[in-house]
Amino acid sequence: MGRLIIVSNRLPMSLDVSDDGSYSLRQNVGGLATAIGPYHKTHKDSVWVGWSGVDPGQYSDEEIDLIREQYESRRCVPIFLSKEEVDGYYAGFSNDTMWPLLHDFAHEANFDPETWRVYQEVNEHFLETLVPLLRKGDKVWIQDYHLMLLPQMLRERFPEASIGWFLHVPFPSPEIFRSLPWSREILEGILGADLVGFHTVDYAKNFEGSVELLLDKHSDDEGRFTMPDGHEAAVDAFPIGIDYNLYRRTSRSNLARMMRRGIEEAAGKRPHSRYLSSLTAESNAAAEASAKEGNWWSHYAHEELPELHLAKSAAEGSPKPNKVIVSVDRLDYTKGIPERLRAYQRMLEKYPEWAGHVTYYLLATPSRENVDTYKRLKEQVDQLVGQINGKYSLLAWSPIHYITRSLPIKPVCGIYAAGDVALVTPLRDGMNLVAKEYLACHDGRDGSLVLSDMCGAAAELSEAFIVNPYDTEAVCEALHDALETSSEESAKRNIAMQARLKSRTAATWCAGFVSALEQVADVSSSDKRLRMEQRNELMEQWGKAGRRLVLCDYDGTLTPLARTPEHAKPTRALKEMLRNIASHPGVDLVIVSGRSHETMNDWFSDLPVGLIAEHGVWFYRYPQVGASPEGVDAAATWEHGWQRASNLPDATAWKQVIQPILEKAVAQVPKSFIEHKDDAIAWHYRLSDQHAAAEEKSALLEELRMVTGKLGLMVMENAKVVEICPVSTSKGQAVRPLVTSDAYDFMLAVGDDTTDETMFAVMPEDSWTIKIGPGLTKAHTRLQNPAALHRLLAYLDAESEVSDLDRSK
């Protein structure tokens, strides 16, 4: 098994220099470090390559060697770039050209041939670092727009390498991308990868459209481009998640809770006598000024001064509760902060009753402060904040608390937790994890999310208040609706979104991409791959269905194939997952296995699932659909234990003929063995020398086929096992009454070997069938391994929670 080589612009750790001149590494928080860091930490065979952030001109050769040793001790390979290289490659082409272009801000892009030249050179620098590292069987996962030329460079040096590339920002429409003078070179560079990944299906389609327009290449039905060197580049979407438990846990830390309490006290959500008395005094003064003659303010009352209305609205006893709005961003023009502030100002103007009762905590961390565009943006934001605070502030209340510094994760989680509303309205964003972090910090709690439809997260978080960030009036109304929403309604919305986030984490994103990369690089299993577009359709159908049927093989499907049958016992986590899915209303989950019914009973009878054992010889809790397998009473099987299919040949008699034949094979192949079932018998050779087993299997199959037909038996070849069972039984025959019953509006069948092909064969054309692993199949789609199926089942479980909530409304 090869290693995973992760390649990114920056390493996940930063260098600290102590007073005594020694060096240490500090783990970075956020971004790639959070998403891929846990995989790198737990998989000791992985290596991370990236820029160290260290200018080699500032250190001696001996010091550079010591720094390199520090990184290598953490399985990181540092790259050292000069200031000129950083200015041209990173600050120049990556951030001045590609960043604005990819975010649909082509008018902000700077097309400088010199920075393009440096960008090419630095990509080559990364290549030269990788060349001595790579071994046969390694997988290389390249990250983001900083390294778009590297996949093709690597392909030319290592034609057989397994290469993946993922973009962490949006990909624009072909019309925008074509404005880049070097767009063709960039596309060709990316297509050097076996797997090209994006956050959403829309971004993937934009990329495919650009390739068609600029390179005149067309993808096949499975999203693959065939390249001149013969390799295929598959394009797909992989929505990134967060470490949900990290944010949930951190939001409950002492520091986060202190931050939350402080914000709530300042906003008047917690008792604070001085705050209340100040508002009361100001409102009383306003009331007196408008009511009594002779007061210095009274002669202005007829002018309807805004100050009077604001002060009155903040009076003690106002029906409006005190609430907090939060947002956390980098100070970047893609984040839509000025547009957001104008929408907030419009809300205060349109709904003055909120004055004194809603406080906006705006955390905007400055970035690239020496760049003119960003300087102008900060000046604009500063001006808008000052304008709003100047116009609407009261003695004891300011509408905006403006924070322009970077904060650690704990106080940020405290800000999230304090927010009754999160205002997340970027003009363009690849995913936007702030929205997901906010929801994790409100785990099981109320709190409303106003979310831009211009970021990838909107596709997953459909229960949020989705808005066009350019539409000031629409954002104003959504913000008002979010503030007005009841705690019960916002908690219900959150539970639905949080269910998805718990199943689609950073860890599952990482594992999903690596699994897909292994699959597309393997010719035997790359066809029929279940792509994100299909996955989304599957989940949509599942969510809308009234009654759902899931048919799952066990060995090789729900669990990896074990060296011996008894070692495949289900884990506690697997059983819990099956229990969760099967417990949802309208879900019939049936495990369809070739194992003995005694084993199936021991392992699964405590779960709310149906069981079919020995390829259809035994049935347990067969779902009531108005039909049943021939000779088996459906009502009886639902109410009472196991039932055996009728009209089967006498196993005692035919085993006397078959067993001696299998015993000869055991004698010829060391470590092979016979497994006995009530109505089947199998020869296993998984532990044996495969060359010797293959030779013996050919002779065995020839001899068995001479006698099995006369006995009413058939021979099945599975994964390193030959099994003999009655010809009248098969998984297909066992499930046929279910799939032809018209009882279900969603059906899914999953299996991994030839015995499952009979199940796929009887499934309706509009149902979902998934083959696990390589090999020819009748199934419509394919997943790489049981772990990939577990991720899919977790997604379906989350969608069941959402649909259950919808039905409860």
Image (cartoon, grey):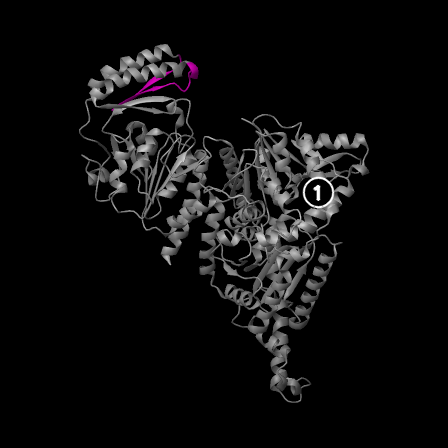
Q: Residue at x 33, y 48 (%)?
A: 585
What is the x, y in percent for residue 204? 53, 47
What is the x, y in percent for residue 76? 66, 33
In the rendered view, tell whether residue 28 sits above or below residue 419: above
Q: Secondary structure at mark 1?
A: helix
Residue designated by label 1 = 119
Q: Residue at x 31, y 22 (%)?
A: 723
**Nearer to me, 270 or 760:** 760
**Which residue lies most toward the bottom here?**
293
| Res. 669 visible in picture | yes
Instruction: Let me know if residue 690 is in the magenta part.
Output: yes
Other-residue count near label 1 (Cα within 10 Å), few / some / many at <14 / 14–19 / ≥20? many
What is the x, y in percent for residue 804? 38, 52
**Which residue lies most toward the front here?**
216
**Nearer to me, 755 or 344:** 755
In the rendered view, tell whether residue 342 sits above or below residue 656: below
Amino acid type at image mark 1: Tyr
Image quadrant containing the C terminus = bottom left
**Nearer to me, 414 or 90:** 90
What is the x, y in percent for residue 546? 32, 51
Stretch in magenta: 670-691
Residue 731 in the figure: left or right of residue 468? left
